Amino acid sequence: MNEPRTIAAHSDVTARGEPLCLIEIGSRGVRMLVAALEDGDLRPITRRYDSTVGLAEVLGMESRELAGRVKQIRTIVKAYVLEAVQQHGVSLGRTWVFGTEAVRMLRKRSPEVFELLHEGLHVHDTFALLARRPPPIVPFVVLGVKYEAYYALTTAVRSLPSLVRPGDSVLAIDQGSGSVELAVGRLEETGLTHSAYKAYPLGTRRLTAELRAVGGDCDRLYDWVMAHVDARPLRGSKPTTHTIVLGSAITMLGRIAARRRSGRRLADRYDPAEVHGLSLTMEDLARQIHDHHWGSELNQRDIAAGEFDTVLAGLVGLRALLVRHAKTEFVVCGEALRFGVAWDLASTLSSSKASSTR
């Protein structure tokens, strides 16, 4: 087996634009990214992963419990906005809050609690035109599935500029807690084009439940996933130059592979640079699925949170999708959807500013 390799996420640059802030309300917590565009590359300034107050485990609860969780989330969002403004000099006009599957489910199941979540925020369904015409208050974007897949592809391509070159095609797979999105596109000199996408309600939360339902039998879970995805691969996905995978399960696999290569223990705090651009094979993936010794390498916080089952189920789901698309190797993306959204917004802001000064 070839030695896993990492690829630098960004080239060396000197000029930096104004920072912007993305706050994502997710299934497992609230996340923040403050970043700035530097000569075409997005440079993260700070990231916040520490919030574990998410929506997934309370979506099926009564409105009172759900409303209580939403109030907690709003408190965290306000604290992140304050941090971005006061510590990193981000203006409110360059601050965005957004949500994906968990927020879409909340809006559908409990409209009144959803209203509580976005109280004081301006609700949108896309980021289109928001950078060119920012509203007077912080916007709250509830991304649709198509846009979620597009930003996953943008993250995969734009966070790995030394890997993905103009003319290259990419299959991006983004596995979240609530769903998994696939997108195919090509990087051209004129920009990124996307040609196809698909989403399945097969996030790690559902996969974990199914794994427990079959008594931890990974082969049975694999068969179950194969029966729940399309028999035909996504259009244009087979001949792609690169396959890039995002999500917590694959980044945990990458962290373990990187740790074993370096001999260091797993860090308590996640650092995208630790795994970003790591090249792995289907043999690596299968080995981790059937050799459970890596479970002892998780830190106590991850073990207490039940991460072993979550990661294992996620890896089985990814293996099924990769097999369906006839892939033999793939690259780990350490960045998340926030990166792609931030890159797109920063690029639009930069283009708009350049146009206004001509």
Image (cartoon, rainbow, N blue to C red):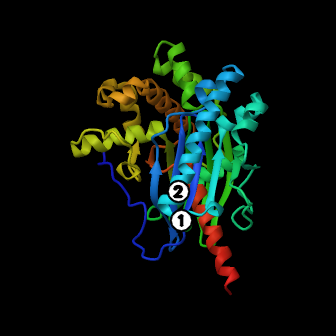
Total marks shown come to 2
Is disc 2 in contact with disc 1, using a CB cutoff of under 8 Å? Answer: yes
Residue 315 drawn above or below residue 24? above
Q: Residues within 10 Å of mark 2 (few under 14, many from 20)?
A: many
- Nearest to the observer: residue 167 or residue 14: 14
Please name the residue shown 33% across and 28% down the image. Answer: 300
- Nearest to the observer: residue 341 or residue 25: 25
Q: Quadrant of residue 258?
A: top left
Q: Give the quadrant of the N terminus.
A: top left
Would you say 243 lies left or right of 227 here?
Answer: left
N-terminal-most mark, 2 or 1: 1
**Three-letter code, disc 1:** Pro
Would you say 123 lies left or right of 280 here?
Answer: right
Please give the residue where the numbered disc 2 appears in the rendered image: 84
Q: Residue furthest bottom?
A: 358
Q: CA distance from mark 2 to mark 1?
A: 9 Å
Q: Give the quadrant of the C terminus.
A: bottom right
